[in-house]
Image (cartoon, grey):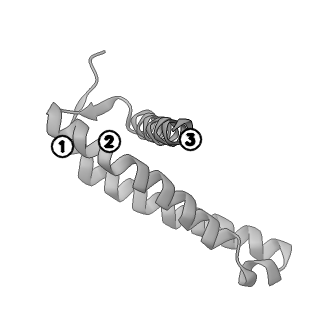
Amino acid sequence: MRRNILVIVSIVAGIVICVGLILVEIYPYHPSGMLGWLSLILVALPVVLGLELIGEKLLQNKIVAKMGRTARILYGVIAILVILTIIALALNWAIPQLRLSSW
């Protein structure tokens, strides 16, 4: 029973942390309305964990391990720039659905 409660508390804490990370990233914007907040809560965990998984798969694989130091650094910079470009495009799409923070 205590293990189940610990799992539930851990999941809720993870969602709160992920939502907080996304809110920090999009500041001074925040969702408008109940549907916007619900969407943020439902999307936050998969987005944060997905970005973490993408970063791990791109930067920690056998091909990258065989590269030289300079090539690894260049590969990492390019991979991060591609990810940041995708994030920027997603934010440009999402910002019209958000409103400026007044708090």
Can you tell which quarter of the image residue 52 is in?
A: bottom right
Q: CA distance from mark 1 to mark 3?
A: 39 Å
Which numbered disc, 3 or 2, marks the residue that appears first in the sequence?
3
Q: Which mark is residue 3?
A: 3
Which numbered disc, 2 or 1, marks the residue that appears first in the sequence?
2
- Residue picked out by circle 2: 41
Disc 1 secondary structure class: helix
Instruction: State the residue in front, 81 or 25.
Output: 25
Q: Residue at x 42, y 55 (%)?
A: 47
Number of the front mark, 2 or 1: 2
Q: Amino acid at mark 1?
A: Gln
The extreme top residue here reads: 103
Q: Position of residue 34 (x, y in %)?
A: 16, 33
Q: Residue at x 38, y 47 (%)?
A: 44
Judge whether 72 appears above or below 42 on screen.
below
- Taking the image as drawn, is residue 2 in sight? yes
Instruction: State the residue in front, 77 or 60.
Output: 60
Q: Position of residue 93 (x, y in %)?
A: 25, 54
Q: CA distance from mark 2 to mark 1?
A: 15 Å
Can you tell which quarter of the image residue 71 is in?
A: bottom right
Q: Are marks 3 and 2 in contact (CB under 8 Å)?
A: no
